[in-house]
Image (cartoon, grey):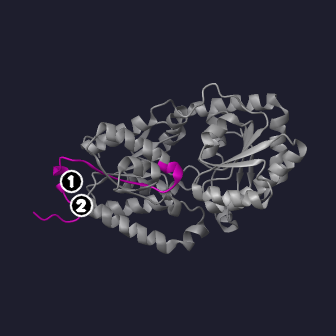
Amino acid sequence: MVMNGCGALACRRMSKRLYVVAGELSGDAHGEGLLRALKARVPALEIRGVGGPGMAGVAGPGLVDWVEDAAVMGVWEVLKRYGWFKERFHRMLGEVREFRPDVLVLIDYPGFNLRFAKAVREACPETRLVYYISPQVWAWNKRRLPKMVELLDEMLCLFPFEEPIFSGAGLKTTFVGHPLVDELEAERLHGAERDGNLVGLFPGSREREVARLFPMMLETAKRLRDWRPALSFEVPAASHKLALQIRAMVAKAGAASWVEVHTGGSHSLMQRACCAVIASGTATLEAAYYGLPYCLVYRVAPLTYVLGRMLVKIRFIGIVNILAGRKVVEEFIQADADAGAVARVLREFLESPEKCDALRAELAETTALLGGEGAHARAADAVAVWLDGRAGN
């Protein structure tokens, strides 16, 4: 029997097939938890796709680790690598055509994933499309919503305020809670005490991000140490490659004796440090969950920032402030992200335990909105329904 495209053979198979796409380290962490929960529900599940080392460890050889190359940020950076992304896009679409997955799960990474969803919908109409970690249309452009309703079968949301946005547009939507709750609870250091002289420096998970932010963080550290020589600083690099980049910058600055650089260990540092400066991103939400007083910094290429300001529809950049609907943590953006401003905020934390306690109370109140443990399990339950063919259209 000859079948064209993805055809009806998928519904006649006994085994179930999943294709999954994540393009950043944060998506890889969430995808790893989702895949573990799915394999517990569907042990014979065949998995292919792209992600990071965590997902590859669960899925096996059918999943390619591409995040170090795929995790670029900003319009200019993406344009410079357009040829590479185009080649990967078509290679992956060919894999989907050949593999004929029952379900495609798209994890965050909207610039790539929404285009990929359109191509898969056209090439493989029998494949169900589930989006995990919804695109932030509430921040950018709600005009995307009708297209997402047309392309997707279900949206799995992490934040409670997202569910009415998507369901109100006509897309089947489930608020599963934030998977960070599961991941962070698993790494909680019970009985850990904060070191009043330890400051965390979190420069981000991308090379360009580190290059833009870490020199300013080093200058901030120098100013604070001039004020209080007993201070020490730690940097949890997101990868071995970034650790080498950061250590070279530390050595050039003559700071190797008082700035420690580790590969990984960010969650431990968030529970041991007195305060921190953190690049905008998932790490700010993680730090909030652990009650770490911090300020947020953000720098991108000037063109990217100008275009973003034209499109963005929200008051804040930090997800903690967005979730709370008010300013909980200080945000320093573009030129305002300078050593003097950041050092002033961190010095206030170091001088005032009362200020730290007040901020911790606000952080706890805000992160309680993320839902309880079990987000991976709830997301896996939703995907398993589509794999089983029981979900409605």
Residue 285 higher or lower than 71, as above or below: above
Residue that protrudes farthest toward the left in the picture: 1
Residue to which mark 2 is pinned: 6
Residue 18 is situated, as x and y percent measured from the top left of the image, at 31, 51
Of residues 61 and 96, the one drawn nearer to the viewer in this rendering = 61
Task: Label 2: state its secondary structure.
Answer: loop
At 62% from the left and 43% from the top, the residue drawn is 266
Q: Work out whether residue 331 can be spotted.
A: yes
Image quarter of the N terminus: bottom left
Instruction: Provide the residue span drawn in magenta.
Output: 1-28
Q: Residue furthest right?
A: 227
* Residue 159 percent across, percent down from the top left: 53, 39
Q: Amino acid at mark 2?
A: Cys
Q: Which residue lies at the image location 49% right of the left edge and 56% below the top edge?
A: 109
Residue designated by label 1: 10
Above-or-below relation of 191 to 172: above
